[in-house]
Image: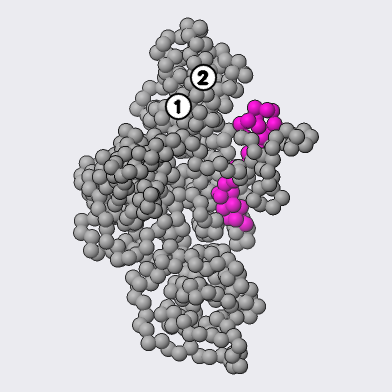
């Protein structure tokens, strides 16, 4: 197969698609592989043969096993790529079946963010102790209720933001539920909407059976946690501890429909023996079965909720330290550095550009509570080159750009990118002067090498504002200047800003436009696609039906700026645009922020 066809197929259908919206032969046709192609049948057979297989076999990044005696007498071992690391060749579930102690450590980027933010608050004389946070901080919960949670752990996704104004968390346990409710299990089991309706008083609280009140009372009669599933099985079917453990493992191993069907058969038989009605049995089994699609243990949700609350508190009360730490730990979370900076600016945080004379490797909080971007955000600048620059500057400040060039060894691309983003503006009049200067050859063996040379004025005119924004986005994928949409908006007639959408009448047809920062098509959404567009005021969200997605798949997946027209829908202060028309937006070669797609 030609590389362009394979790449097009892989890109347009990266995660496989939903059979009920577009079958595999149609996907092949749209990728440029006609059914009449002599290799089409082999391609189709190979793709079908790969379905259901793991995408790759890998080493668990935080998994450890322990056994008595020598492990290599129990199982085959192999050397890992990393020195002094050994990999067990057996699957983690096989290890557990054999009674070998298995420990999984979950590595979370937010842990590093919190640690760095706490250290920054201590250094800046405003220390925060995560173990002593106020339990019901009004500002933190107000921020959650307004879905102002970009950058906050676990509750920053589009789905979480759409739920927060409806759930309206008021205490810590509400955050526990918020973390757990946006999961495939509760959504597929039709448990999320009943909980929200009961919480808002629109639906009466009911229980599958009166005996389940103690197990389900804290979640208004709706099972949301794995522990509640086990309690239901033990109460309704007299499951033993061992049988409940079998159910737990089936729930945890969410890719195994076979395991789940085996346990469900046993559950149905046990409930029938206890005399429960068929309707009751079907309801309970359907609820339990949905958790095979992944539901949270309550203990896990509580741990995650603590991290969510701590990160929200820091955003509410120590925004500069929080945003600096987020930028220093990218990539992580749902949003790019460009979106994080714009959100920080909307919260009153000031950002200063990268400067060869002032920036460190990391983004730092300055005495006036503003943030100076670090060298780490420059795309083409290597860590080794950046640290050499810092070592030389710390040994003796640079007297000029020429002095910097003579003392620091960077490649041409690195010098050009630093000049284009204005990192040398402390030494030259403007960015194009810097570009002119970095192109001048510097000979390290020159007899007069140590004699300072005054930079010659370049014949180039300064970049205008739009060109500076373009250079920032090209060199860093972010800018501390205005959002590109602020510069493009004058040509957009009749397009609403994200911040103005609450003023629009529900049901009216509106147009929104912006940089695509998220494309989602969750398996629980039956083929619907959710697109988030960022403009200079915030984020607008659009819902795309399966037929419309197929009609506009290439535009939606390939274009970085879109205009979407559709009907405005508002429920519980959550606004979506139901797309009726989608088109590419001309963006003058402005590079878009990175988009978090089809996760």
- Name the residue carrying label 2: 262
Rendered image coloring scheme: one colour
Q: Position of residue 109 (x, y in %)?
A: 56, 50
Ranked by sequence position, the earlier of labels 2 and 1 is: 2
Confirm whether the magenta stretch covers residue 105: yes
Could you say whether the residue bearing mark 1 is in a helix, strand or loop?
A: helix
| Front residue of this view, candidates 342 and 18 | 18
Q: Which residue is drawn at 40% across and 65% down?
A: 473
| Front residue of this view, candidates 2 and 340 | 2
- Can residue 514 be seen here? The reply is no
Q: Which residue is drawn at 68% across and 43% down?
A: 78
User: Farthest residue in the front direction?
Assistant: 38
- Name the residue carrying label 1: 290
Confirm whether the magenta stretch covers residue 156: no
Q: Residues within 10 Å of mark 2 (few under 14, many from 20)?
A: few
Q: Are marks 2 and 1 in contact (CB under 8 Å)?
A: no
Res 205 → quadrant: top left
């Amino acid at each position: 197969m030609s590389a362009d066809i394979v790449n097009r197929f892989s890109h347009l259908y990266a995660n496989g698609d939903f059979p009920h919206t577009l079958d595999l032969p149609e996907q092949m046709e749209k990728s440029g592989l006609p059914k009449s192609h002599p290799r089409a049948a082999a391609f189709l057979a190979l793709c079908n043969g790969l379905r259901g297989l793991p995408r790759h076999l890998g080493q668990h990044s935080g998994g450890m096993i322990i056994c008595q005696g020598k492990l290599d007498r129990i199982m085959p071992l192999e050397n890992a790529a990393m020195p002094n690391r050994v990999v067990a060749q057996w699957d983690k579930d096989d290890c557990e079946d054999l009674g070998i102690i298995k420990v999984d450590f979950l590595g979370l980027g937010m842990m590093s963010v919190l640690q760095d933010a706490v250290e920054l608050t201590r250094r800046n004389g405003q220390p925060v102790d995560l173990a002593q946070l106020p339990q019901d901080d009004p500002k933190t919960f107000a921020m959650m209720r307004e879905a102002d949670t970009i950058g906050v752990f676990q509750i920053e996704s589009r789905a979480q933001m759409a739920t927060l104004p409806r759930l309206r968390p008021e205490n810590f346990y509400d955050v526990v539920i918020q973390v757990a409710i946006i999961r495939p299990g509760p959504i597929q089991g039709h448990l999320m909407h009943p909980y929200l309706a009961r919480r808002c008083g629109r639906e009466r609280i009911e229980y599958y059976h009166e005996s389940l009140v103690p197990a389900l009372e804290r979640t208004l009669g709706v099972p949301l946690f794995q522990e509640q599933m086990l309690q239901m099985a033990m109460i309704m079917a007299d499951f033993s501890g061992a049988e409940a453990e079998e159910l737990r493992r089936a729930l945890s191993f969410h890719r195994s429909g076979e395991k789940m069907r085996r346990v469900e058969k046993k559950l149905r038989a046990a409930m029938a023996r206890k005399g429960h009605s068929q309707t009751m049995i079907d309801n309970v089994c359907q609820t339990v079965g949905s958790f095979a699609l992944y539901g949270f243990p309550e203990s896990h949700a509580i741990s995650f909720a603590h991290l969510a609350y701590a990160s929200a508190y820091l955003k509410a009360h120590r925004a500069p330290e929080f945003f600096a730490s987020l930028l220093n730990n990218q990539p992580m979370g749902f949003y790019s550095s460009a979106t994080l900076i714009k959100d920080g600016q909307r919260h009153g945080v000031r950002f200063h550009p990268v400067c060869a004379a002032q920036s460190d490797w990391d983004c730092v909080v300055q005495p006036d509570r503003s943030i100076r971007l670090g060298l780490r955000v420059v795309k083409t600048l290597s860590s080794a080159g950046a640290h050499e620059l810092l070592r030389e500057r710390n040994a003796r400040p640079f007297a000029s750009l020429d002095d910097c060039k003579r003392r620091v060894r960077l490649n041409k691309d690195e010098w050009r990118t630093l000049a284009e983003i204005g990192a040398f503006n402390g030494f030259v009049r403007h960015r194009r002067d810097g570009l002119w200067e970095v192109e001048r050859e510097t000979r390290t063996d020159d007899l007069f090498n140590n004699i300072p040379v005054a930079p010659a004025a370049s014949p180039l005119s300064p970049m205008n504002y739009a060109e500076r924004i373009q250079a920032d986005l090209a060199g860093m994928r972010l800018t501390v200047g205005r959002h590109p949409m602020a510069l493009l908006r004058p040509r957009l007639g009749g397009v609403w800003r994200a911040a103005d959408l609450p003023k629009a009448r529900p049901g009216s047809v509106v147009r929104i436009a912006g940089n695509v920062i998220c494309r989602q098509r969750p398996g629980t959404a039956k083929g619907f696609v959710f697109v988030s567009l960022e403009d200079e005021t915030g984020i607008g969200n659009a819902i795309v039906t399966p037929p419309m997605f197929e009609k506009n798949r290439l535009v939606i997946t390939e274009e970085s700026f879109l205009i979407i027209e559709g009907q405005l829908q508002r429920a519980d202060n959550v606004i979506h645009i139901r797309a009726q028309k989608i088109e590419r937006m001309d963006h003058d070669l402005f590079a878009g922020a990175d988009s978090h797609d089809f996760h």
